[in-house]
Image (cartoon, rainbow, N blue to C red):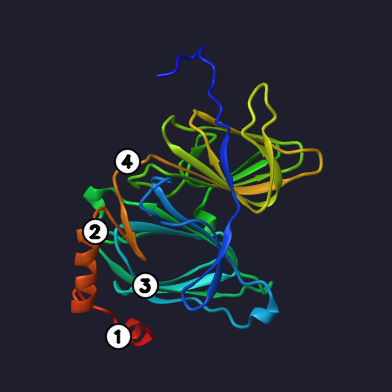
Amino acid sequence: MRTQSAEKTFRHIQEIIEPQMVVEGAGVLLRRSFGPHTSNLFDPFLLFDHFAFNKPREGAPVGFPTHPHRGIETVTYMLDGNVRHRDSLGNTGLIGPGDVQWMTSGRGILHEEMPRRGPTGAINGFQLWVNLPAAQKMSPPRYQEVTSSAIPVVAQNGVTVRVVAGAYAGVQGPVTEIAAQPLYMDVTLAPDSNFELATPQGHFVIAYVFQGEGAFGADDTHDGEWVPAVHMLVFQDGDCVRVKTGHESPTRFMLMAGAPFREPIFPYGPFVMNTREEIVQTLAEIRAGTFVPSVPESLARAE
């Protein structure tokens, strides 16, 4: 434990990732910063995608028709537009601007996600995949759906933080009881602002810069590294993150942290288990029609 007189250990930047364009679902164009891999370098995180439909020539938005998940949690956070979803549990809903859906797939779920443009004609949002530990991969599926109005906002000294999970300035986010002990925040800095947040040593910390630019990884003697949108940052270990902005350079980023499970993973498409044998069993259940107990008729027609 760090004593009161001990100095903070600021996290510096370990890696800057330029997202790559990929196509998923029924032709959805995404910026992907990283995806599932047996190397498990982003433990406990598995994937981070930034999706947007902002050009009229792209035509009507396409989405993600009925597909399965097992062994992971999917986190959808919308900025503009909305995503309509329905699943094999009979749930239906709408994820609108500022809303978050934290879905724990557990032992298995089928669901559909269909983006729609908002009044501005744009669709912008993020999807994060969070791993589940081996002991929880076959747990019952569940949701934590939080509307924009239920997400606390802390605004002080040019810094505005929407706290989805974890805590900032003594304010706790509404998403709780997640195995990875995550921190998930939408952070906006006005020009000439400073942001600082304590993070547990040993937790994995990343930031996705999607507007403006800022100096990340600053400490008391180092101004940090200036990073413009659009980039994913991986931080070194430490117990504090600091970000600064310049005189004319506001920035906005997603800040994410979590406790690594340090378990082997075996990813295969929308499934992430711990062994190849578990994936083989999952595929056998898909073929046999026993992956989920039943499928609502409306969802079955969409497959």
According to the picture, the residue beneath numbered tag 1 turns out to be 297
Question: Looking at the image, is 83 positioned above or below residue 127?
Answer: below
According to the picture, the residue beneath numbered tag 3 turns out to be 111
**Which image quarter: residue 220?**
top right
Q: Mark 4 or mark 1, which is nearer to you?
A: 4
Whether the residues at callouts 3 and 4 have beta carbons within 8 Å, the answer is: no
8 or 288: nearer the viewer = 288
Whether the residues at callouts 2 and 3 have beta carbons within 8 Å, the answer is: no
Question: Looking at the image, is 184 positioned above or below residue 6?
Answer: below
- Residue 262's disc number: 4
The residue drawn where x is 39% and y is 52% is 130
Disc 1 to disc 2, C-alpha distance: 32 Å
Q: Amino acid at mark 1?
A: Glu
Give coordinates of residue 100: x percent, y percent: 48, 59
Q: Amino acid at mark 4?
A: Arg
Q: Amino acid at mark 2?
A: Arg
